[in-house]
Image: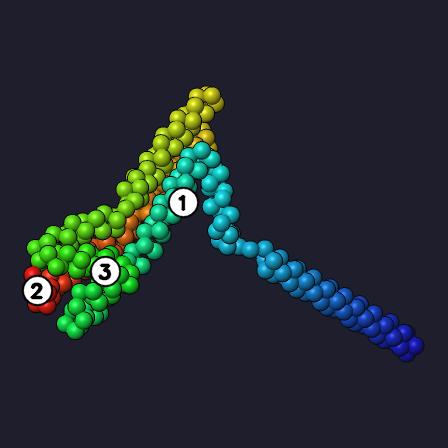
Amino acid sequence: MMKRVLVFMAFAALLLIGTAQTSQAQTDQTATTQQTTAQTQAATTQQLDTQAATPAKGETVLHKEIKRLFIEGGAGFMSSILLCLIFGLAIAIERILYLNLATTNTDKLLAKLEKSLKEEGLDSAKEICRNTRGPVASIFYQGLDRAHEGPEMAEKAIVSYGGLQAGLLEKNLSWISLFIALAPMLGFLGTVIGMIQAFDAIEQAGTVSATIVAGGIKVALITTVFGLVVAIILQVFYNYILSKIDSISNQMEDSSISLMDMLVRYVQK
């Protein structure tokens, strides 16, 4: 009987020890899992913070990228292309401002002149033209100033002074055309010289390396890209200026015909 009790107690002790060890192992495993989870969360948080603090590759600042390409393309040719852009834009902006100031509401001006010629005479009409800005008013003034000599002389004055005003409208456009043609030419020249330098590097290396060839060609083509971009920008401004000149020229021609009709009706020879 005593032997059975001792065996039972030994068996119970073994069960208790095994249960304790199992619980301890589970506790240790749970603690380890919690610690690993905490470390993983901390690492993930740190990685997210790092990603938030570090900008993505596609978020490179534009002006820094342009500066890098400018330096890689070579200061000589890239500076020449940049000067073409600066001078071309300066002339284009000056022309746009001049043409906008030269634009006149011809319908309103003709209505004032007709009323003045009908009620007050030539002197009042000339005063209106003198106080109105733009080439159309200047042409009208010349025609009114010669109106007392007859419609034929007034028409000649309008035609001759209209040609002068048309020349003023087209002033400096040839320089914009020059810069439009010069910018891609400089780009192509820089590309050719860059290709020559790339082949010189291959010759000095004694072998055809993809790195040498690709790097040299990339640098050589940068000047062409910049030259074409400059030409495109200036071409857009140039076409806009031409459209404004055509619009003002059409206004001058149409309004001059209307003015001659008024002179024939209201001014005696």
Which residue matches tag 3? 137
The quarter of the displayed image where residue 146 is located: bottom left
Q: Is residue 64 left or right of residue 41?
A: left
Q: What percent of the width, then of the height, locates residue 206?
A: 46, 21
- Say which residue appears at 39% left-offset and 26% top-offset: 196
Up-down relation of residue 23 to residue 220 (above or below): below
Q: Secondary structure at mark 2?
A: loop
Please identify, in this view, whether the residue under mark 3 or under mark 1 is nearer the observer.
3
Tell me what residue is drawn at x 49 percent, y 44 percent. Answer: 67
Q: Using the image, tell me which numbered label, if any, was put on residue 86.
A: 1
* Foreground residue among 150 and 206: 150
Q: Disc 3 on helix, strand or loop?
A: helix
Lateral position of residue 269 relative to residue 233, left or right? left
Which amino acid lies under the numbered mark 3 shown in the image of this protein?
A: Ala
Query: In the rendered structure, are the residues bearing label 2 and label 1 in contact, judged by CB atoms less than 8 Å apart?
Result: no
Residue at the far right in the pictured view: 2
* Crowding at mark 1 (Cα within 10 Å: few <14, some 14-19, many 20+): some
What residue appears at the point 32 percent right and 37 percent down from the top-left corner?
182
Quadrant the N terminus occupies: bottom right
Q: Residue furthest bottom?
A: 1
Task: From the viewer's side, name the closer residue of 136 and 30.
Answer: 136
Quadrant in which the C terminus appears: bottom left
Circle 2 residue: 268
As rendered, which of 176 and 257 lies closer to the eye? 257
